[in-house]
Image: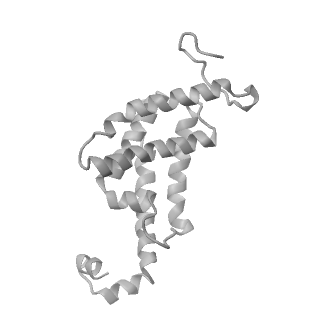
Amino acid sequence: MRDLAARAGITTPTIYAYFESKNDIYDAMFGDAAAEFEARMAAPYDTEDSAAVLVAGTLRFVQFCTEDVARYQLLFQRTIPDFEPSEESYAHAVMALEGTKRRLATVGVTDPKHVDLWTALTTGLVDQQVSNDPGGDRWARLVEDAVAMFLSHCQIHVENAPRASLTPRRSPTRKGARR
């Protein structure tokens, strides 16, 4: 708290005039970061091609997370014991996830388990980048391959699912694809 107060140019007791506890400070930080994340992910993309938007969105996600690792940890890793963001602060994170679900739906990915797999895949790339090549791009360079692999995986499962469970989607263009 002393370091935070010193950086803000105030005394430690002054912080408590604005925040009741450390968790309230974390909540304000989470809310600001989640709002910034939501805005970044919702910004227009340079393409209308759905798969290209997934690649661009994943690259945005990787960049957002790696440019401020502490913010990434606060938003996505739950590293602070006993901290839960307030409903108000968490609402921005929920909206960002809804945007991700909409982008995934444009390529026919709507199954909740595939959405979970997507979040695991993308945060896994970030975790590897942050842990093993900070400041580099070793795992960020894998985004296009990861998106292609993910879409291929979902295609196989979607194509083999009972027809009643499918949402309308484009026909496979690959020669010899199962129907």
**Horizontal and vertical percent position of residue 61:** 39, 46
Labels in figure, total: 0
Q: Residue furthest right?
A: 164
11 over 147 or under it: above or below: below
97 over 177 or under it: above or below: below
Quadrant that contains the N terminus: bottom left
158 over 74 or under it: above or below: above
Image quadrant of residue 110?
top right
**Horizontal and vertical percent position of residue 163:** 73, 26
Image quadrant of residue 178?
top right
- Residue 167 showing in the rendered view: yes
Q: Residue at x 30, y 86 (%)?
A: 12
**Horizontal and vertical percent position of residue 67:** 29, 52
Q: Nearer the viewer, residue 22 or 53?
A: 22
**Horizontal and vertical percent position of residue 87:** 56, 66
Q: Residue at x 52, y 26 (%)?
A: 152
Q: Is residue 90 left or right of residue 142?
A: right
- Residue 46 showing in the rendered view: no
